[in-house]
Amino acid sequence: MRIACVGGGPAGLYASVLLKLRDPGHDVCVYERNEVNTAPGWGVTFSVDLLHRLYRGDPASATQIQDSVISWQEQALHIRGSRNVLRGGDVYNISRARLLEILVTRARDLGVRIEHGKEVGSPADLADTDLIVAADGLHSRMRQAGNFQTTETIGRNKHIWLGSDKLFTAFGYLFAPTDKGWLWAYAYAINDKHSTFIVECTPETYAGLGFDAMPTDEALPVLERIFGEYLDGHRLIGTLGDGSKARWVNFRTITNDHWHSGNVVLAGDSAHTANFTIGMGTTLAIGDAIALAESLRDQGDTESALTRYEARRKAEIAAILAEARCSERWFENIARYVDLKPHQMGELLWARRSSLVASLPPRVGYMLHRARGRLYR
């Protein structure tokens, strides 16, 4: 088969690796609009479950990934001078640039062609291709050119994806007050030099502090002052790996009624997005690549394989996407929780993926969740 993976992120690259491994006779090419060694974004997170799946799929790249990760067990809520440890578990962080470097090298070693700086505008540009894996992200041109019945929902809060030269060795939810409302950051180390530092706030706080009229370079010193107690004199970084500037955005939730149309199949953020507050984007993208490769291996014809892939993945990720929406709404309604005692807020922060949390008065939700925890301890 002649296979084109449009988009050189985790979904497109890992799909190319698996498809070439399954059948070295496939002619596989990855088209990535960014130039080589220019990876937008900072770090990604994933659990030990995904690491196990990576080893089953391709031990060679999995070993390199494991050798490059930073792991942590604790998540902690920091607010009003207190630090409240939430329940832990093994979680891995890796810089997006390093992850893509590993997958690019592995794909090329297997014979995959990778064309950086190549923008593919529509499936018509790949007319001689048997299968197009549309892994070109949130604003997928491949998806926009097809009939996938896409729904897009815009989140309420504003967030900006930054880096920092302070190393946060445990995952921190860092809350900082201002006279215009609260801001909070999600901070975690991605290598031995840098951390991801995502700042979020309500639209009222965003506008009240003037960020709506402030270029990124002017916003960074303001944010450094606001989060000064956590940064300890370290700086925030607003220039991304591709040279662009980070900017404030609203999260966009993408869903599609159909994941394949003709010879085009969606994967990763092209097919679905899960709010970043649950840290599952990379896990879902690589899971798509694994499921797609397995379906193509197990089914006799391409159409049957794509139908099976779509049905399987929709079922597998439905609960995760529902949890992501609950988590997003929890932070959109932060005023319900931020005046609780820190240990109460921390308990509900941990439980935020449950729809029950939003339907109960916060203190009632706290008591019920604590009681449930004692019952199943």
Image (cartoon, rainbow, N blue to C red):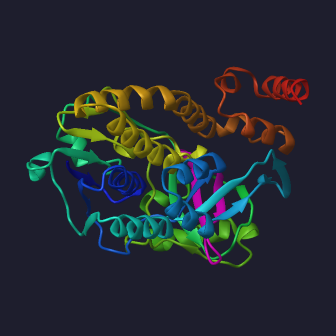
Would residue 190 be visible to someone looking at this image?
no
- The percent coordinates of residue 167 (x first, y second) are 69, 72
Residue 321 is one of the magenta-drawn residues: no
In which quadrant of the rendered view does residue 253 lie?
Answer: top left
In which quadrant of the rendered view does residue 256 lie?
Answer: top left
Name the foreground residue: 350 vs 302.
Answer: 302
Is 157 drawn above or below residue 362 in the view shown?
below
- The percent coordinates of residue 39 (x first, y second) are 41, 68
x 27%, y 46%: residue: 133
- The percent coordinates of residue 259 (x first, y second) are 31, 33
x 77%, y 55%: residue: 73
Q: Which residues are magenta?
A: 181-205
Name the foreground residue: 219 vs 112.
Answer: 112
Q: Which quadrant of the figure contains the C terminus?
A: top right
**Principal secondary structure, stretch drawn in magenta:** strand
Q: Is residue 184 left or right of residue 275?
A: right
Is 369 drawn above or below residue 90 in the view shown?
above
- The percent coordinates of residue 99 (x first, y second) are 49, 65
Residue 193 is one of the magenta-drawn residues: yes
x 63%, y 78%: residue: 193
x 38%, y 75%: residue: 37
Number of marks:
0
